[in-house]
Image (tube, coloured by chain):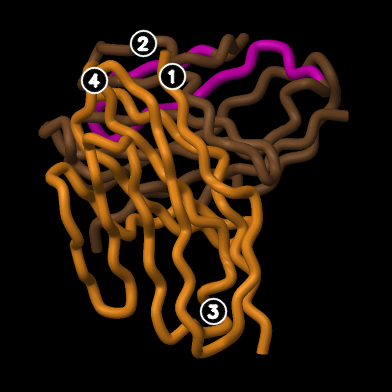
Amino acid sequence: GQNIDQPTEMTATEGAIVQINCTYQTSGFNGLFWYQQHAGEAPTFLSYNVLDGLEEKGRFSSFLSRSKGYSYLLLKELQMKDSASYLCALLDSNYQLIWGAGTKLIIKP
Amino acid sequence: EADIYQTPRYLVIGTGKKITLECSQTMGHDKMYWYQQDPGMELHLIHYSYGVNSTEKGDLSSESTVSRIRTEHFPLTLESARPSHTSQYLCASSGLRDADLLFFGPGTRLTVL
C-alpha cells in the first residue's frame, strides 16, 4: 500500500531554522510535492522533487532521497507568517496525489 | 489574471437540501479536482476530471456528483445534504502534464444543520 508520515505539530522560534520530515512508502513514485496551507485557506505550492537531492528556493529548501523514502522541507530565517500547515504529497505510479495529514508549524517570537 | 474561483465561500444549509458548489478556472487547465478536508486532516479526493465530458470518482466515497461540460467549469452537486457533509470543499486544477502542480481555489466551507 501507500503511506505518508509527517509529524503532527512542530514549534520553532522566529529567525531560527526548522526541518519538517516526510517519510513515505509506495510501490511507484513520480515525484513529491510540498504545499503550505494557512489556517482556513487553500494549499499553495512550495516545491516539487523527482530526483534525489536538494532543491533550494529562497528561504525554503526541499530534499529527497528515493532509496530511503524520505523528504524534508527546510525553512530558514523563520518569520511569523511561516506559521501554517505544511503538506507532503506523493505522486504515485498512476499519477495520483497521495496527501499526508500535514505538519502544523507554530512560530514563537 | 489567470485564477481559480469557488462560490459560495461559506454556506449554511438545512438537511435534505440540494446544493451545487461552483468552481471555475481561467487557466485553460484540462485537469480539475474536488477535495474534501476536515480541520487538521488530510485532503481527500472525491472527484476528478481530465477534460470535457470526463469525470471520475476519487478515493473518498461521496454522495456527490460532478459534471464537466466546459473546460473552465467543474461544479459539484449534493442532491440531499446531510450533517455528515459538513466540511471544507476545495477545487483545484492542473495542466495536462501529470506532474504539473495543483492550483487550489479558496474553498467552500459547508455546514449542514
Residue B97 magenta-highlighted: no
Disc with the residue nearer the chain's start (2 vs 1): 1
Residue farthest front in this picture = A68
Q: Which residues are magenta?
A: B65-82
**Residue at 81% of width from left, 29% of height from top?**
B112
Instruction: Tell me which corner region of the image, top left, top right, bottom left or bottom right, holds residue B85.
Output: top right
Residue ID for mark 3: A81
Marks 3 and 4: CB-CB under 8 Å?
no
Quadrant of the rendering where the C terminus of chain A is positioned: bottom right
Q: What is the chief secondary structure element of the magenta stretch?
A: loop
Task: In the rendered view, tell whether residue A62 sits above or below residue B80.
Answer: below
- Apparent side of residue B11 relative to residue B76 in the rendered image (left or right): right
Callout 3 crowding tier (Cα within 10 Å): few <14, some 14–19, many ≥20:
few
For label 2, the residue is B56
**Callout 3 secondary element:** helix
Identify residue for label 4. Answer: A28
Residue B77 part of the magenta segment: yes
Residue at mark 1 to residue at mark 3: CA–CA distance = 32 Å
